[in-house]
């Protein structure tokens, strides 16, 4: 068997500027990978690199030829373990780049067997939790409007970005606009440990479910301080990158938050989930701002999750790929019996 590989960079404008405590984004640079077998069947994957983890579209494009050469050397899309080991040997870092290739290979392998990826893993897509819809930082009136619009569109689980001196004002505005919504907050490492504990008290009064990454990932004792004193459950995001991080956060949080673009592969994502369960943690899967070329793969994992935050493609003005319908926050595969991850060009 022989495999042909290719990749392309795509710039995806956002529908609206998206702001978190670290900055504002107006477009998303993704890299799309295709792996085609000698029968003409193609697997699709996507990379959504984050500068916070040392990756850009430039670094992905720089390492991608070496990664794809490794796939072609192995030559068998069903040899996923061998391929992912080769990818790690070729490029130790660049997890989003490696994950795009992993997704494409998984997609092709499942397509060749004629089954959806979730079926290959023995999962039932009806067990997936709802995804949250993220409301980014903005002025107070605009945040209130975004929350109201999200609820009107059917999203009843909202994730609110915080990390400003207006946090109480912002969460009050959201609660005013969405009195019945389930709320989660994400500080993106912006608070001090004592600040996080204090804020957890009034966030709990506003019926917030949990707080995500309240303190810096470089402050593990600060995370423990918050976990031991917070009135809300704590989710670890930036503190939890791969399965190897799980033992270190197990006594510092309640929820492990994985992202495919952090883990480096679908196999590593599943290992992280298993490690979190073994340590008694709940599990959430988040995302970057990314196309359905990769969101569709995360949706295949959704039955293994307690919480989902897979709304990255919803923030785009237009997505060149489809594969999962997130209307109302329900994670619906475009066709439950579509082979592979379900991702395909929107124009098809």
Image (spheres, helix red, strand yellow):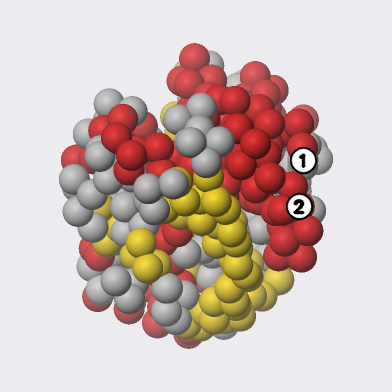
Q: Is residue 107 above or below residue 86?
A: below
Q: Quadrant of residue 22?
A: bottom right
Q: Is residue 156 above or below residue 243?
A: below
Q: Which residue is mark 1?
A: 91
Residue 334 drawn at (x, y percent): 23, 57
Left or right: residue 242 compared with residue 203:
right
Disc 2 crowd, CA 10 A, few/some/many (<14, 14-19, 20+): some
Q: Which residue is mark 2?
A: 63
Q: Nearer the viewer, residue 47 or 53?
A: 47
Left or right: residue 114 compared with residue 12:
left
Q: Quadrant of residue 74?
A: top right
Q: Which secondary structure lies at badge 1? A: loop
Q: Which secondary structure lies at badge 2? A: helix
Question: What is the C-alpha distance between the residues marked 1 and 2?
Answer: 7 Å
The residue at the far top in this view is: 278
Q: Quadrant of the C terminus?
A: bottom left
The structure residue drawn at horizontal position 40% and vertical position 37%, both measured from the top left corner, is 109
Q: Earlier in the sequence, mark 1 or mark 2?
A: 2
Residue 242 drawn at (x, y percent): 64, 32
Q: Is residue 200 visible?
A: no
Q: Confirm or deny contact between disc 1 and disc 2 (CB under 8 A).
A: yes
Q: Is residue 202 above or below residue 144?
A: above
């Amino acid at each position: 068997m022989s495999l042909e590989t290719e990749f392309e960079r795509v710039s995806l404008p956002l529908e609206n500027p998206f702001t978190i405590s670290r900055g504002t984004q107006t477009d998303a640079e993704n890299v799309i990978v295709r792996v085609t077998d000698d029968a003409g069947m193609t697997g699709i994957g996507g990379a959504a690199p984050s500068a916070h983890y040392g990756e850009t579209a430039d670094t992905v494009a720089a390492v991608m030829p070496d990664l794809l050469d490794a796939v072609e050397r192995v030559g068998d899309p069903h040899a996923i373990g061998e391929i992912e080991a080769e990818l790690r040997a070729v490029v130790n870092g660049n997890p989003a780049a490696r994950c795009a290739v992993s997704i494409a290979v998984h997609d092709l392998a499942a397509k060749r067997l004629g089954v959806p990826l979730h079926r290959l893993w023995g999962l039932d897509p009806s067990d997936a939790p709802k995804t949250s819809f993220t409301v980014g930082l903005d002025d107070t009136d605009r945040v209130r409007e975004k929350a109201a619009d999200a609820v009107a569109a059917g999203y009843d689980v909202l994730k609110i970005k915080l990390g400003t001196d207006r946090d109480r004002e912002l969460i009050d505005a959201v609660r005013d606009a969405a009195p019945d919504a389930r709320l989660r907050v994400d500080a993106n490492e912006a608070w001090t440990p004592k600040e996080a504990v204090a804020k957890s008290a009034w966030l709990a009064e506003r019926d917030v479910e949990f707080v995500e990454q309240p303190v810096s990932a470089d402050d593990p004792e600060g995370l423990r301080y918050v976990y031991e004193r917070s009135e809300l459950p704590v989710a670890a995001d930036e503190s939890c990158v791969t399965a190897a991080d799980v033992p270190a956060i197990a006594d510092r949080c309640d929820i492990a938050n994985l992202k495919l673009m952090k883990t480096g592969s679908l196999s590593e994502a599943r290992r992280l989930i298993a490690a979190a369960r073994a340590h008694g943690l709940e599990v959430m899967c988040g995302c970057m701002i990314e196309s359905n070329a990769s969101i569709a793969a995360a949706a295949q994992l959704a039955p293994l999750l307690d919480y989902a935050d897979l709304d990255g493609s919803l923030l785009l003005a237009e997505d060149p790929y489809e594969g999962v319908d997130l209307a109302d926050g329900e994670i619906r595969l475009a066709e439950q019996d579509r082979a592979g991850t379900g991702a395909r060009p929107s124009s098809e």
